[in-house]
Image: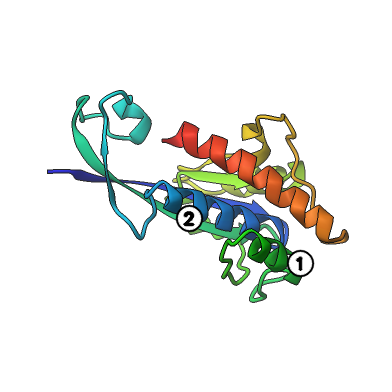
Amino acid sequence: MAEPVSKSVLFVCLGNICRSPIAEAVFRKLVTEQNLSDNVSTILCLKEANPNAFGAENCEKNSFFLLQWRIDSAATSTYEIGNPPDYRGQNCMRKHGIPMTHVARQVTKEDFATFDYILCMDESNLRDLNRKSNHIKNCKAKIELLGSYDPQKQLIIEDPYYGNESDFETVYQQCVRCCRAFLEKAC
C-alpha cells in the first residue's frame, strides 16, 4: 500500500499582494500539471528516484507512495493583511491562464514549525525571516531565496509594486523559472 508523503512550501514577500501570491499560484499550477497537488494524491514510483529526496527513507526503489503538497504565501509585514493580490498581478496571471485567489496574511510562528520550505523574494525578506526564526524553538523550515533556484542566476525577485504591467510579467517569468527548478529539486 502506498504511504502518503507530504511536502510544504510557503512563499514570502513584503506585503503578500505582488510577488509571493504570484509564486504561490505559479507553483500550484506546476504541481497540478504534474499531478502532485494537494487536491490530487498521486502514486509515484521510485524506480529511478532516490527515496530520501522524498522524505521516504524507508521506501525501496520500485516502491510506491503518495506525494501531496501544501502550498501557501504570506507577508513579512502587516501592511496589506486582508487584501487581495494587486490587480496588475491578477491581470498578469489571468493572461497566462493561472487562477489566483489569495488574501494577504502575515507569517506566523506556526509557519516556521509546519512548512518544510519558506522561500522569499529578496534580502530584506530573508533577513526578517531569519530573525523571526531565531525565536522559534521548533523551526523546521528551510529558509532561502526563491531566486537561488533561478537557472538564469537572478537571485532577487524585485518588488513590482511601484512599477508597471511589464514589471509584473518579469516577476511572473522569474517565478516560473524558479518554481520549476525548485519543484525538480524538491521532488
Amino acid type assigned to the residue bearing label 1 in the image: Arg
The image shows residue 6, relative to residue 90, as above or below, that is: above
Residue drawn at the location 49% of the way across and 39% of the way down? 183
Q: Secondary structure at mark 2?
A: strand
Is residue 107 visible in the rendered structure shown here?
no
If the image is split into quadrants, where does the C terminus sit?
top left
> Residue 83 location, x and y as percent?
67, 75
- Mark 1 or 2, which is nearer the eye? 1
Where is mark 2, residue-wise? 71
In front: 21, or 124?
A: 21
Where is mark 1, residue-wise? 88
Amino acid type assigned to the residue bearing label 2 in the image: Ile
Label 1 neighbour load within 10 Å: few <14, some 14-19, many 20+: some
Q: How is the image coloured?
A: rainbow
Residue drawn at the location 72% of the way across and 29% of the way down? 153
- In contact (CB < 8 Å): disc 1 and disc 2: no
Q: Hey, which residue is sitting farthest bottom in the picture?
A: 82
Residue drawn at the location 62% of the way across and 50% of the way down? 132
In front: 137, or 102?
A: 102
Q: Hey, which residue is sitting farthest left in the picture?
A: 1
Is residue 50 visible in the rendered structure shown here?
yes
Residue drawn at the location 55% of the way across and 46% of the way down? 118
> Residue 22 location, x and y as percent?
64, 57
If the image is split into quadrants, where does the N terminus sit?
top left
Q: Secondary structure at mark 1?
A: helix
Q: Is residue 83 left or right of residue 30?
A: right
- Mark 1–mark 2 Cα distance, whole angstroms, equals 22 Å
